[in-house]
Image (cartoon, rainbow, N blue to C red):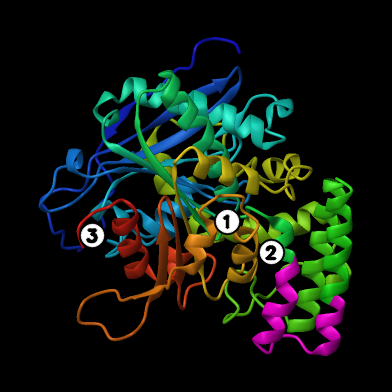
């Protein structure tokens, strides 16, 4: 393991956008730093204390946000594009989750965002390593930040981050039970999450067909490659399944005139044309990770933010190792973790699933399909519940979402949202956070 993990803490003044009128006299308190999770493997984190005009941070929960990819940066994309206090233009975000919680962004797996490894053999290759690294980080974080040990702690996630969140949540629950990590862990929220890749893939054709984005011929082509993926997974050929997954996405793009996998109401113009595809992993990386490292965010993170943080090594570029992160996880990518969700429910851990109506890559049909496969004894009672319509405010008449819950399991169907729910429906996402963390509306 090498030397003990080192936690570097810095208390700093944040960037202020010129001309922005603040509701309070100062921006929320921030901390950031690195934890050495293994010898020569360094994980970057960024903490914002809750910013609520009537409540101290001690009266609100702490949320760990896990981004997807694998290889997409929570400290970058999740922070500046989705739920942090400022957007990438350095303007105040009206729907920041800091109104309801403190937020801990972590660039994981190592090599993501500002996290880095000194040796290329140290990239995580499976969920087991991702979970192990995060346990080191969380153990160090809660040991040093004792003010958060008793505050309700939740893991919220998006996309592949949901797969990681499930594994981390189970390991954390066990660590808390054993007393090896001191924190008040209250549950995990899995957003548009890659819990069962096969169920997502099998639903792509029917979903696109039902929304008039495939014709009969296109549906037959997508269904054909989906069956190839199913055969590979049934034979435990997960590397092949990942390759075929890339092939399935190519077929979808050809048949739909490049539908956006993250929101079917928008169009994605590919950087790499079909006759110039080259390396499969590079193509998949460009579609699903580089998409979250666009020029404006890249310039912000490697310019003003890097200058602000002051601790990023000269040899580290934000997102510089992310393609290696993605490629190293390719064999693990298509493996399901439905069994881990079952274990969480059996351990009485609160599990929330939320999904955007317009998401394709992890469409709601696929989420519902794997949920039906749960062995949770209360699944039938959950299924029999009638969902409830939700509105962003008492004055609103437009349905923003539907919600269903039973015991320690809940589902939110978020309308008019794609894969990145907080970006598309910020008010509803914030309302959902308050509901999940049991705050009064």
What residue sits 29% from the left and 57% below the top? 434
Q: Tell me which label, 2 or 1, sits earlier in the chain.
A: 1
**Mark 2: few/some/many CA within 10 Å (<14, 14-19, 20+):** many
Check if mark 1's residue and mark 3's residue have beta carbons within 8 Å: no
Q: Tell me which label, 1 or 3, sits earlier in the chain.
A: 3
Image quarter of the C terminus? bottom left
Looking at the picture, how far across and down is residue 125, in whole percent? 72, 35
Viewer-side residue, 109 vs 177:
177
Q: Is residue 2 left or right of residue 245?
A: left
Q: Quadrant of residue 153?
A: top left
SS for callout 3: loop
SS for callout 1: loop
Residue 313 visible in the shown view:
no
Say if 221 sits above or below 277 in the image.
below
What residue sits 13% from the left and 48% below the top? 55
Q: Nearer the viewer, mark 2 or mark 3?
A: 2
Viewer-side residue, 235 vs 420:
235
Looking at the picture, how far across and down is residue 239, in whole percent? 84, 47
Q: Tell me which label, 2 or 3, sits earlier in the chain.
A: 3
Number of marks in picture: 3
Image quarter of the N terminus? top right
Looking at the picture, how far across and down is residue 74, in whole percent? 48, 47
Residue range corresponding to the magenta coloring = 202-221
Q: Mark 2 = which residue? A: 200
Picture disc at residue 193: 1
Q: Quadrant of residue 193?
A: bottom right
**Mark 1: few/some/many CA within 10 Å (<14, 14-19, 20+):** many
Marks 2 and 3, how far apart in space? 44 Å
Picture disc at residue 18: 3
Q: Quadrant of residue 436?
A: bottom left
Viewer-side residue, 7 vs 233:
233
């Amino acid at each position: 393991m090498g030397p003990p993990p080192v936690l570097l803490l810095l208390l700093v003044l944040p960037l202020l956008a010129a001309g922005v009128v603040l509701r309070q006299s100062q921006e929320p308190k921030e901390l950031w730093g690195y934890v050495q999770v293994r010898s020569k493997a360094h994980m970057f984190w960024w903490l914002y204390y809750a910013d609520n005009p009537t409540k101290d941070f001690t009266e609100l929960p702490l949320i760990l946000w896990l981004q997807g990819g694998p290889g997409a940066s929570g400290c970058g994309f999740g922070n500046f594009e989705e739920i942090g206090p400022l957007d990438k233009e350095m303007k105040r975000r009206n729907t920041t989750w800091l109104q309801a919680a403190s937020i801990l962004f972590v660039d994981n797996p190592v090599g993501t965002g500002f996290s880095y490894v000194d040796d290329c053999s140290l990239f995580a290759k499976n969920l087991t390593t991702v979970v192990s690294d995060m346990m080191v980080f969380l153990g160090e974080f809660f040991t040093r930040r004792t003010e958060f040990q008793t505050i309700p702690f939740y893991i919220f996630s998006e996309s592949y981050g949901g797969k990681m969140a499930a594994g981390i949540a189970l390991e954390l629950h066990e660590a808390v039970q054993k007393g090896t990590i001191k924190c008040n862990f209250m549950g995990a929220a899995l957003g548009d999450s890659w819990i069962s890749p096969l169920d997502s893939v099998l639903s792509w054709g029917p979903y696109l067909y039902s929304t008039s984005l495939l014709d009969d011929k296109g549906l037959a082509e997508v269904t054909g490659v989906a069956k190839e993926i199913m055969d590979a997974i049934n034979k435990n050929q997960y590397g092949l399944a990942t390759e075929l997954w890339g092939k399935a996405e190519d077929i979808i793009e050809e048949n739909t005139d490049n539908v956006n996998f993250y929101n079917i109401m928008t169009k994605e113009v590919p950087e790499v044309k079909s006759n110039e595809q080259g390396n499969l992993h590079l193509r998949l990386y460009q579609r699903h990770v580089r998409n979250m490292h666009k020029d404006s965010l890249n310039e912000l993170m490697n310019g003003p933010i890097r200058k602000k943080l002051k601790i990023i090594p000269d040899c580290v570029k934000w997102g510089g190792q992310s393609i290696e992160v993605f490629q190293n996880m390719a064999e693990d990518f298509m493996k399901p973790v439905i069994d881990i969700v079952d274990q969480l429910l059996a351990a009485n851990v609160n599990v929330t699933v939320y999904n955007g109506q317009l998401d394709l890559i992890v469409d709601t049909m696929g989420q519902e399909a794997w949920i039906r496969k749960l062995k949770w004894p209360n699944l039938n009672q959950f299924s029999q519940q009638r969902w409830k319509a939700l509105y962003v405010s008492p004055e609103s008449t437009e349905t923003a979402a539907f919600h269903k819950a039973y015991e320690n399991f809940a589902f939110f169907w978020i309308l008019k949202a794609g894969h990145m729910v907080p970006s598309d429906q910020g008010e509803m996402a914030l309302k959902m956070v308050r509901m999940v963390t049991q705050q009064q509306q």
